[in-house]
């Protein structure tokens, strides 16, 4: 339990920041990061770390010159690299008298209510013990079809899981800029982004390094997840001295701060809205859009005018207008073939054995305003 004035902080760092060009772990970066985490702890705050780097560490541990592309090899390398990664963190934290606690998560831990509560209880107990949880995706066993894809998304979901006050996403730039600062020296850092600012929906350069899976686009998506969880987010430079301390202190001259939204979605809907992979799209008419946005209804076949992509019932689909506006995302109750066969038809016109709802409102997140 936090005292008044103290915060619960989730910090995330990626593979590209933790490893060199050869894929070797940069112990100097880990040491510097841990020094900051220890200083934040000394200020009375609680800290959780979400870290990438297991696969990259496994690549160097096996002496490979290239990172394989197949899933099975990557999973095996993560199993090899994870203990090496944890050993580096444990050693750095021990110098500050702190104990590292390894926590490996998979998407099911956020989708299933029982698993969600169990994961939260475990993390709460670790914080009660005074440990510093070091969290990573369980890459060695994660199904590639239902995994996070990068730890930015997972860090945002963890911040919701533990009711964090602040999420700090460390990357290779000092925040969000008006343009790519590597290409355009005149690019200006954006100090603050409001909860409803269009920047939270911007499409940025998705390209990360070959040692990681994220990029600025991924971090913007994570900031949006966190914002809609009621959590303030800061994107800051991993290589910039004192960036975590500056984020905790609220320094406006460092990084980009994304303010928390007044919406507070449950974890399952956060996953549907922002983290799950889109399997297809349905286009709706203006009447259906208005019903979804203003009345919070379910999506019925009568309002659908087009279907893109092949999807099965239970998969995540996006709902868009004819003009391309993103209206909502949700779990389909019908396959793409069923939607195509029934679109434009009212429920009374459908057969008794035919599903009558494309997406139920309980499984739908409205993104438009």
Image: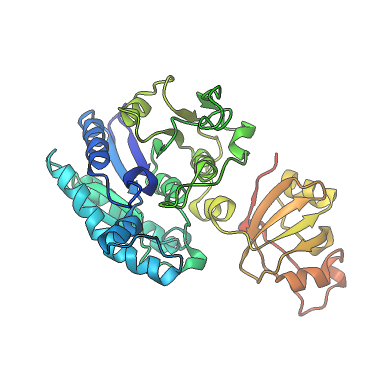
Residue at horizontal 35%, vertical 29%? Answer: 240
Residue 1 visible, this orientation: no
Does 144 sit above or below residue 93?
Answer: below
Q: Nearer the viewer, residue 265 or 338?
A: 338
Q: Nearer the viewer, residue 190 or 334?
A: 190
Residue at horizontal 87%, vertical 71%? Answer: 349
Task: Quadrant for the C terminus, please.
Answer: top right
| Residue lying furthest front | 65
Does 351 sit above or below residue 271?
Answer: below
| Residue lying furthest bottom | 353
In percent of width and height, residue 202 lies at 62, 38
In percent of width and height, residue 80 lies at 27, 64
Residue at horizontal 45%, vertical 63%? Answer: 112
In percent of width and height, residue 365 lies at 63, 51
Q: Quadrant of residue 13?
A: top left
Residue at horizontal 45%, vertical 35%? Answer: 233
Residue 47 visible, this orientation: yes
Give the total number of marks visible in the rendering: 0
Does 341 sit above or below residue 5?
Answer: below
Display colour scheme:
rainbow
Q: Is residue 358 left or right of residue 350?
A: left
Task: Quadrant for the N terminus, please.
Answer: top left
Q: Quadrant of residue 355?
A: bottom right
């Amino acid at each position: 339990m936090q005292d008044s004035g103290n915060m619960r902080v989730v910090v995330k760092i990626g593979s590209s920041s933790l490893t060199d060009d050869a894929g070797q772990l940069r112990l100097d970066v880990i040491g510097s990061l841990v020094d900051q985490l220890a200083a934040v702890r000394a200020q009375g705050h609680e800290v959780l770390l979400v870290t990438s780097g297991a696969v990259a560490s496994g690549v160097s541990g096996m002496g490979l010159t290239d990172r394989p592309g197949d899933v099975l090899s990557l999973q095996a390398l993560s199993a090899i690299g994870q203990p090496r990664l944890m050993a580096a963190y444990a050693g750095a934290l021990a110098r500050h008298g702190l104990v590292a606690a390894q926590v490996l998560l998979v998407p099911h831990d956020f989708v299933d209510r029982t698993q969600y509560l169990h994961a939260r209880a475990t993390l709460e107990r670790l914080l009660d013990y005074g440990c510093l949880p070091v969290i990573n995706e369980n890459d060695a066993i994660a199904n590639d079809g239902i995994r996070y894809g990068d730890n930015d998304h997972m860090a945002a979901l963890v911040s919701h899981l533990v009711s964090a006050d602040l999420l700090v996403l460390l990357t290779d730039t000092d925040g969000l800029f008006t343009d790519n600062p590597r290409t355009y020296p005149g690019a200006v850092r954006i100090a603050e982004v409001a909860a409803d600012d269009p920047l939270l929906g911007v499409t940025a350069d998705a390209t990360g390094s070959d040692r990681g899976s994220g990029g600025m686009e991924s971090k913007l998506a994570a900031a949006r997840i966190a914002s809609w969880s009621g959590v303030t987010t800061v994107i800051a430079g991993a290589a910039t001295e004192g960036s975590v301390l500056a984020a905790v202190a609220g320094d406006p001259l460092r990084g980009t701060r994304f303010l928390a939204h007044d919406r507070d979605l449950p974890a399952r809907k956060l996953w549907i809205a922002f983290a799950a992979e889109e399997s297809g799209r349905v286009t709706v008419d203006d009447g259906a859009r208005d019903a979804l946005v203003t009345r919070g209804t379910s999506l019925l076949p009568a309002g659908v005018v087009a279907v893109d992509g092949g999807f099965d019932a239970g998969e995540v689909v996006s709902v868009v207008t004819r003009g391309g506006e993103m209206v909502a995302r949700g779990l389909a109750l019908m396959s793409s073939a069923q939607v195509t066969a029934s679109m434009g038809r009212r429920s009374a016109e459908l057969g008794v054995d035919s599903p009558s709802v494309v997406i139920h409102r309980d499984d739908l997140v409205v993104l438009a305003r």
